[in-house]
Image: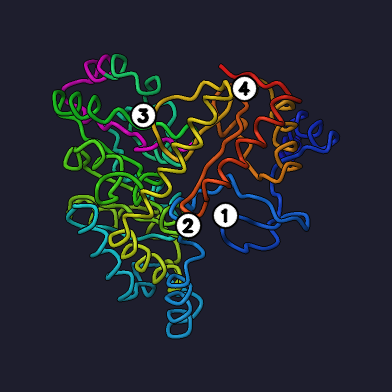
Amino acid sequence: MTDPFSKCRLPEEFEALAAAGVYPFYLPVEERPGGGEVVVRGRRVLMAGSNDYLALSDDPRLKEAGERALRRLGAGNSGSRALNGTLALHQGLEEELAIFLDHEAAMVVSTGYQANLALNALFGPGDVLLADRHAHASLIDAARLGQAQLRRYRHNDMGQLAELLEAVEPESGAIVLTEGMFSVGGDLCDLPGVAKLAARHGARVVMDSAHDAGLLGAGGRGAAEHHGLQSAVDVQSVTFSKCFGTLGGAVAGPRHVIDYLRHSSRAALFSASLPPACTAAALTALGIIRGEPERRRAVLSAAERLRSGLVALGFAIPAGGTPTVSLRMGDALTCCRFWAGLLEEGVLANVMLPPAVPGRAALIRLSVTAAHTGGQVDRILAAVAAVAARVAPIKD
């Protein structure tokens, strides 16, 4: 009999990365002094990999709200939402989120990943699910857990999406599954194209707004509002671990759909509810997102400075203007050497390797937040330039 644990080996290239002293994952942050900086290996460095776009995770108002909820309601709820784990605080956050996102109702869960997994209950045996090839792993996991036929279309390729929609049998339901702002490259969904095709074929649109809710649009509602197409999105998932600066997630949509998910989604039914401190912090963050648009302006200004600076260095950066950008490195070892070089220069970035990216791609992902000053963005650019001169990455 074969040992079922025999498959539990890291890829050989990971061993090579460790041997070369450039293994980039699970690096512990020792302190978070704020101001766009963290302490790793005893050094204070610029954080250029965080998705805390509005720099709210360190905001005193979130900390105070979380502390008050912790003292009043405890560290956890010890139960699922369906049974004994629902707080009035959860319901208050759901009501405010539904208003903010312009949907009838919302359901709060414990993580953004869980919010997307909860969507699987929508994907029935008579449905066809059409997912962008760059859709987040949590969306694909939800698709695999559901019973719908999964078909993938090339990233933002409206021609192929049109072909796939035309091939859906009349008796089948069709759902287009996409992200608003894609997590790796920071580019936006072609929502105008998706909405037009969905309307033509009677398909529903489900969008993951993990990275864009709180960041884009006049009111911060996300990529759909940015495109002027909020009403074109039938169901929208969000996470609180990016712009909201804490932990948790939610699904918003028509009331009957959300009520159905509350009683049908195993990810929501059989998981303990979001702790009080995170719930209170998310509710406070929502108020700040609504009331302080200057935070969005600050991070988007930093993003433009970063992107234009990278273009000036010779990197091919796609249009988009969002705070996240990825640099192609060619292979894993080159990528991790580049990452290590940036860390030596005082900049902590992210390495993106399979399965986080398709094929054998190797990327350095950079991101900026509202906490980064112009001078700090210039320090990131100077570090990239210095390391590029030594490592010579692929730039096109």
Q: Is residue 42 left or right of residue 396?
A: right
Q: Amino acid at mark 2?
A: Ala
Residues at marks 3 and 1, CA–CA distance in whole angstroms: 35 Å
Which of 14/323 is in front?
A: 323
* Image quarter hosting the N terminus: top right
| Label 3 close to label 1 by CB (< 8 Å) | no
**Which numbered tag is attached to residue 360?**
4
Pick whichever of labels 2 and 3 is earlier in the sequence: 2
Residue 84 among magenta residues: no
Of mark 1 and mark 4, the one earlier in the sequence is 1
Amino acid type at image mark 3: Ala
One can see residue 3 in this view: no
Residue 169 position by quadrant: top left
Note whether 77 is above or below 331 in the view shown.
below
Question: Bounds of the magenta span?
Answer: 162-183
Q: Which residue is mark 1?
A: 36
- Residue neighbourhood size for the residue with mark 4, other residues' Cα within 10 Å, grouped as few (<14), some (14–19), many (≥20): few
Figure quadrant of the C terminus: top right
Per the image, the residue denoted by label 2 is 55
Depth check, mark 2 against mark 3: the one in front is: 2
Height in image: 109 above or below 156? below
Residue 167 relative to residue 5: left or right: left
- Marks 1/2: CA–CA distance: 8 Å
What is the number of the mark on residue 131? 3
Circle 1 packing at 10 Å, graded few (<14), some (14-19), many (20+), is: many
